[in-house]
Image (tube, grey):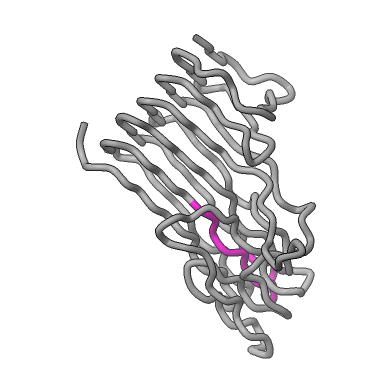
Amino acid sequence: KVRVVAATPHAPLLDAATENLASFTLDAEAELVFSGWESALRATNITISGTLTHLDHFAITEPDSSGDWPVAHRVLLEGSNITVAASGLIDADFKGYTLSKGPGTTTGRAGAGHAGSGGFGYDSSASPGEAYGNPAAPFQPGSGGGTDSLSREGGGVIRILAQGHVRVDGTLSVNGRDGVSNQGGGGSGGSIWIDCRTYDGSGWLRANGGNGGGGRGGGASGLTRREGDAGP
């Protein structure tokens, strides 16, 4: 059993997959940061009352040799029964690709795409970022807004795999950031993907695109998928 009971000056970093623990509890004042795509928190019973997050994708500046944008970090939970309490937050806001980067980015002051196209920019001279990703298997971070320096980054990635029940009374969030001033393009939302046998709770799953500056150039929403019957 593992219990993280209080925040420290520097939140602990999880940079590999844990052993299969009997239980893991993150208390309300505690935080844990994921580093790496294969880093995973694995336990039969997981209870999150504090904050989970992951490192950002800002260091990724171009596609790989096959033309795909690499993915680097996510929050990955694997267990039998997983609970995000009312005070719990899985926070991957603004952890996607930075401005002018990612598969849904564009030029100028337009917004990034993801679940759909982004918004036209402040001066309408740049085309919106295009949609990308698979709604049946959402795993990609959100993209940054256009090349204008006032554009901003996309949201990150949350993945939950549960053999039993998932309850969310808190918040899972992968929002893109708003563009700055009256010109910047918003980043697109990231991805949330939950697999479980049953699901309930009164919490929130958020994958909003960032607003564009001046009411234009907003980023597209991200992708969310939840597979599991309602109720315990």
The secondary structure that dominates the magenta segment is loop
Question: Which residues fall within the magenta stretch?
Answer: 178-191
Using residue 208 as the reference point, say whether residue 72 is left or right of it: right
Residue 121 at x, y = what percent? 64, 81
Given the current orientation, which residue lies at the most extreme bottom position?
125
Is residue 180 highlighted in magenta? yes
Which of 136 and 65 lies nearest the eye of the viewer?
65
Identify which residue is drawn at 60% across, 42% down. 74
Residue 167 drawn above or below residue 110 = above
User: Would you identify the image quadrant in which residue 210 lies?
Assistant: bottom right
Q: Is residue 19 left or right of residue 61?
A: left
**What residue is shown at x 69% (from left), y 70% (from top)?**
181
List x then y, in percent, for residue 131.
53, 73
Q: Residue at x 61, y 76 (%)?
A: 129
* Front one among 168 and 212: 168
Q: Residue at x 69, y 76 (%)?
A: 183
Residue 29 shown in magenta: no
> Which image quadrant for residue 34?
top right
| Number of marks in picture | 0
Q: Position of residue 21 (x, y in %)?
A: 49, 15
